[in-house]
Amino acid sequence: MLSLSSLTRSVPTKLRRRTSLAAAVLVAALGVFASAPGAVAGPTPQPRELGPNVIIFTPDMPQATIQAKVDEIAKQQVDSEMGTGRYALLFAPGTYGSVAHPLVFQVGYYTEVAGLGASPDDVTINGHVDVYNRCTNGTSNCIALDNFWRSVSNLHINAVGGSGCHSSAEFWAVSQAAPMRRVHVTGQQLSFMDYCSGPSYASGGFLADSKTDSAIVNGSQQQFYTRDSSIKSWSNGVWNQVFSGVQGAPAQSFPKLPYTTLAATPAAREKPYLVQGDNGLSVVEPSVKTDSSGADWTAGGSSGRTIALSDFFVAKPGDSISRINAALAGGKNLLLTPGVYSIDTSIHIKRAGTVVLGLGLATLTAENGSTPLVIDDVPGVDVAGVTVDAGPVNSPVLVQVGTKHQRGAGGSSAEDPISLQDVFLRVGGPHAGKATVGVQVDSDHVLLDDLWLWRADHGVGGVGWTENTSDTGLVVNGDDVTATGLFVEHFQKDNVIWNGERGRTVFFQNELPYDAPNQAAWQHDGTLGYAAYKVADIVTTHELWGGGSYIFTNVDPSLHASHSFEAPLTAGVKLHDLSTVSLNGAGTIDHVVNDTGGAVTPTHQGPETVANYGG
């Protein structure tokens, strides 16, 4: 068996496809071989209310039919980065594919692949559920840096089959907004890079509540977060690899090796998921957990509640917001079927315990400067699997969690917090968009798990310093807020502003804006640029583990940011394992945090690191 365990942290810089960047690193890739058992699979007619873009497969259908359908959707979606197609491919309990006839397919943009079992092991795919590099010039410039907006969850992948180099592993070569959750991988190794074509860059994955019986190839993943899982091995690290509650994780070794390892995750709630039982479909919402480690389902199953599909308002694009809000006010939860929804007011969640679950990366687009999603300060609300887009008229906020005047008794609590999982925001990209703030959290005790808040640096419309304007990705005013897996990129002022007390972030990834036209446009109060992550001066207690911030200024390469991290120097504010990098010879970060840490420059890429600050 061969692996990429010999790769070192000097694997590639984070270079975007669209910037015609020069490659500085050669990535070697090696394969493995394995075999696995098998069976048959297929779809039956799905519940009509879920719409045509939710496809439920069952084991009683000919495999050729399933293969044809998943290949058809992959062909449509694999290059549709800014398209409007949305799909959920759901597998009922059973076994699909065999050693002799594996089920092998790719997962394209805006495609969710999920099992419908109570445990991942209730759905076995003998084959591959893969994401490969995208090649922009025939067989050259093959990278995963733009492999966003897709997911796989709640199934057992017994990796076998494939063709050529792609028969050597289960490939999940992705960057941001492409989570792998609640998955059991056996057979061939699991690779988070596609080493079958070069230069193979990847940057920014997320793995949670999962178990791997075979080796993991991290490869060219420059930053990656793994939470509450059990893994056999991890091959290497580049700049910012973070593990919390991961059995088998590499030992804490930052900065000698770029591993930040916490024995447990401070607080989390796993994402709600669909299950199919004797009485049809229902949604399981796991319970909140603290100081957790390992995958929930390997220890006899996770606690939580099961909600019948009949207790959901099943929404489709075109449904009026007044109708959705009336259903929510009447006690229904909300299931958003795949598609793009025009939101001209707000979807307003007022009832405690409401679950909002998006399928197929259901997308809410702001119209007329609306705030598409508003959550009152009530306990137990869970919003998951939703993408929110800004529109051409500026929105003050895209997602509002609580309001300052609501905070107090009876709201979100440590025992029953408001939770957001796999919530992704875009300002520009598929179309013109403007928003002052992406997500604003005014409630206390909120859990943020796998958020990618993105001011677009490329797209088909509305991209430019004066076009897709947005100040800040995340503002946290509430106390006791925990973020696990926080990705915030390209905002024009401070990317994250944390005003609340006792905040915690485990893993933070950031790129500063590419497109500031000059230094005069990107500075304030004697400070060059803005911070990636700012803990306000008034804060007395805060902790961050594993933060990476990168600069690439492709309009004016001479730009400086005084620092990426900004925090008061006080005993209760502790920042651990910080790194900065200058990408592709463009842009300078003078210090890592405040005036501490060395500079990364066009001639010194870095990384520069600070292992501990404050405390």
Image (tube, grey):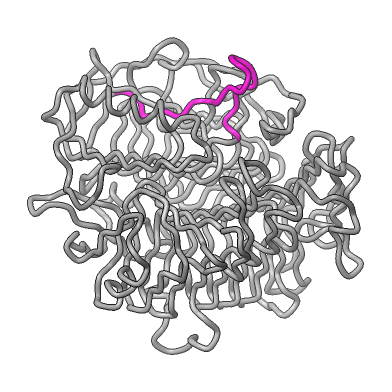
Query: Whole-percent x and y of residue 168?
Result: 43, 17
- The relative height of residue 611 versus residue 97 in the rendered view (above or below) is below
Magenta-colored segment: predominant secondary structure:
strand
Of 89 and 459, which appears nearest the observer? 459
User: Is 17 situated left or right of 415 in this image?
Assistant: right
Of 329 and 535, which appears nearest the observer? 329
Displayed quadrant of residue 586: top right
The region drawn magenta spans 127-145
Of 105 and 599, which appears nearest the observer? 105
Residue ID at (36%, 32%): 213
Query: Whole-percent x and y of residue 372?
Result: 48, 66
Residue 6 seen in this snapshot = no
User: Is 45 situated left or right of 149 in this image?
Assistant: left
- The relative height of residue 609 versus residue 40 in the rendered view (above or below) is below
Residue ID at (41%, 69%): 347
Residue ID at (48%, 43%): 149
Residue 323 seen in this snapshot = yes
Residue 452 falls within the magenta-colored stretch = no
Displayed quadrant of residue 615: bottom right
Residue ID at (74%, 58%): 492
